Image (cartoon, rainbow, N blue to C red):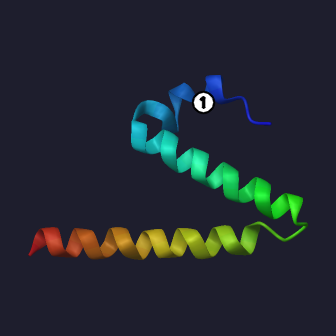
Amino acid sequence: MVKVKQKVSGAFRTVSGAKIFARLLSVNLTFLKQERPVLPYQLIARSIQFLDDLVVTIFQMA
C-alpha cells in the first residue's frame, strides 16, 4: 500500500490532488485484483485528461 501520509509534499497540497490520487489508486488496485495490465489504461486516462485540459485552456484563451 502507498504511504499516503508522506505524500503531503507532492500532489496533496489541494483537495483536488487528493481526489485524483484516490481515484487513480482505486482504479489501479481494481485492475491488479482482476489481473489486468494497468499501464495501458493509465495511458488512455492520462491522454483523455490532457485533451480535457487542452480544451479548457483553449476556451479560456478565447
Horizontal placement of 2 versus 45: left or right?
Answer: right
Mark 1 surroundings within 10 Å by alpha-carbon count, few (fewer than 14), some (14 through 19), many (20 or more): few
Q: Nearer the viewer, residue 29 or 51?
A: 29
Q: Quadrant of residue 45?
A: bottom right
Horizontal placement of 20 versus 53: left or right?
Answer: right
Mark 1 highlights which residue?
7
Which residue extends farthest left? 62
Q: Quadrant of residue 58?
A: bottom left
Residue at position x 39%, y 35% in the image:
14
Residue at position x 40%, y 76% in the image:
51
Q: Position of residue 60 (x, y in %)?
A: 14, 68
Q: Position of residue 42 (x, y in %)?
A: 66, 67
Horizontal placement of 40 versus 15: left or right?
Answer: right
Q: Position of residue 22 (x, y in %)?
A: 59, 45
Three-letter code, disc 1: Lys
- Residue 1 vertical position relative to residue 58 in the rendered view, above or below: above
Q: Nearer the viewer, residue 9 or 18?
A: 18
Q: Position of residue 5 (x, y in %)?
A: 63, 23
- Residue 12 vertical position relative to residue 59 in the rendered view, above or below: above
Residue at position x 72%, y 75% in the image:
40
Quarter placement of the N terminus: top right
Quarter placement of the C terminus: bottom left
Determine whether the residue tagged by mark 1 lies in a helix, strand or loop.
helix
Horizontal placement of 10 versus 37: left or right?
Answer: left
